[in-house]
Image: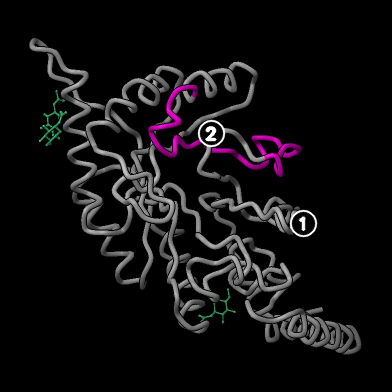
Amino acid sequence: MRVLLILLAGVSPAVLAQTQSPKRGLVFIPNSDHPEDNQIWAQAGSDLTWYYNYQWEPSPAFEDVTQEQFEFVPMLWGVTDGTGFLDSIRNRIKSGRAITHVLGFNEPDSPYSGGSNIQPSVAADVWVKNIAPLAEDGVQLGLPACTGGWGGIPWLQQFLGNCSELISTEDEKKNCTYDFVNIHWYGNFEGLASHMGSYAAAFPNTPQWITEYNLDHQDLPATESFYNISAEYLDRMDSVGRYSLYGSFRPQDSNVGPNAVMLNEDGHLTNIGSWYLGVSKTAVTNPQSGGRRLAVQMGIFVFNLMLGILLS
Ligand SMILES: *[C@@H]1O[C@H](CO)[C@@H](O)[C@H](O)[C@H]1NC(C)=O
Ligand SMILES: *[C@@H]1O[C@H](CO)[C@@H](O)[C@H](O)[C@H]1NC(C)=O
Ligand SMILES: *[C@@H]1O[C@H](CO)[C@@H](O)[C@H](O)[C@H]1NC(C)=O
């Protein structure tokens, strides 16, 4: 039996090196052309414990999955859709679905793709009316998730200043409260670590959620290397509450380049996707390939298994 284990370790270090991280979640980008892709993330054996979808309603794809199996974290994406958020979350809590965290606006400091482009004072008003009251229900509040650009932290500081003005009176000065910050980053690992450091300086002793990150538009070796180094770092850092890698789609649907994706062109997990889910023994492929490499790996695996049994 020992011979078998040594042989397997030699062939598939990835299988044995897997760590399960309760911090790890999904930025869910549904695929309506290939609905089967939507079922990959909550599959048995997946390390992913939670997801968000930029909305405050859970995704229909995960209707049959319980909150305990795969925790849904609602987001108030922008201000135009503000009304209804608070009631919806409270109704969900009343109906027994354990909503424990919510996320503030998505990239309010950006008018570009996905950015909700909100003035801090307007965002503060919507926060006070729709998000802040949830603290009374024991829900943990995540600050708006700004872009990785230089303007993110100043936007948040202005937002918090405006928010304090709104809730303070002549006699009593108050600050708006929050439980964690949300961080987005696209770029290399040194940049990610430095950006997290800037947030730690601006918001000391505040848990960090890295809710979008990746090395975008780079070659595959650099992207895989970034993935490994950052996953190890985010798992290790006590300041990181949770994280979610951006890229739950195929290369043809990617706005972060063809290599920063978790699915290949056929909808199978890429290396990064399978490492992220902790299921690398079942699928290992490159983004722009079919299942050939998987077949070769399975062949080697079976060969070693037979050899191991023969020798033990
Ligand atoms: C928001 O805050 C900024 C600076 O922090 C300030 O210049 C502005 O007057 C504030 N706006 C409102 C509506 O409170
Ligand atoms: C509000 O926050 C500011 C800046 O972090 C701090 O200086 C001030 O003491 C706080 N005020 C209250 C009432 O907590
Ligand atoms: C990334 O980690 C996996 C194991 O989890 C390993 O198989 C792979 O070689 C690593 N790749 C790089 C570029 O570090």
Quadrant field for ligand 1: top left
Q: Position of residue 21 (x, y in %)?
A: 55, 55
- Name of the residue lying farthest toward the left: 170
Q: Secondary structure at mark 2?
A: loop
Location of mark 1 (residue): 36
Q: Estimate how packed mark 1 is, as few (under 14), some (14 to 19) or many (20 or more) residues with alpha carbons within 10 Å.
A: few
Relative height, residue 92 to residue 67 (above, below): above
Q: Residue at position x 51%, y 77% from top? A: 224
Q: Residue at position x 32%, y 51% from top? A: 110
Q: Are marks 1 and 2 in contact (CB under 8 Å)?
A: no
Q: Is residue 296 magenta?
A: no
Q: Position of residue 75 (x, y in %)?
A: 47, 37
| Residue 84 left/right relative to 206 | right
Q: Position of residue 64 (x, y in %)?
A: 76, 37
Which quadrant holds residue 281?
Answer: bottom right
- Name of the residue lying farthest toward the top: 171
Q: Estimate how packed mark 2 is, as few (under 14), some (14 to 19) or many (20 or more) residues with alpha carbons within 10 Å.
A: many
Q: Residue at position x 43%, y 51% from top? A: 114
Relative height, residue 129 to residue 16 (above, below): above
Q: Which span is picked out in magenta?
A: 60-84
Amino acid under label 2? Trp
Relative height, residue 102 to residue 265 (above, below): above
Location of mark 2 (residue): 56
Quarter of the picture holding the C terminus: bottom right
| Residue 142 left/right relative to 12 | left
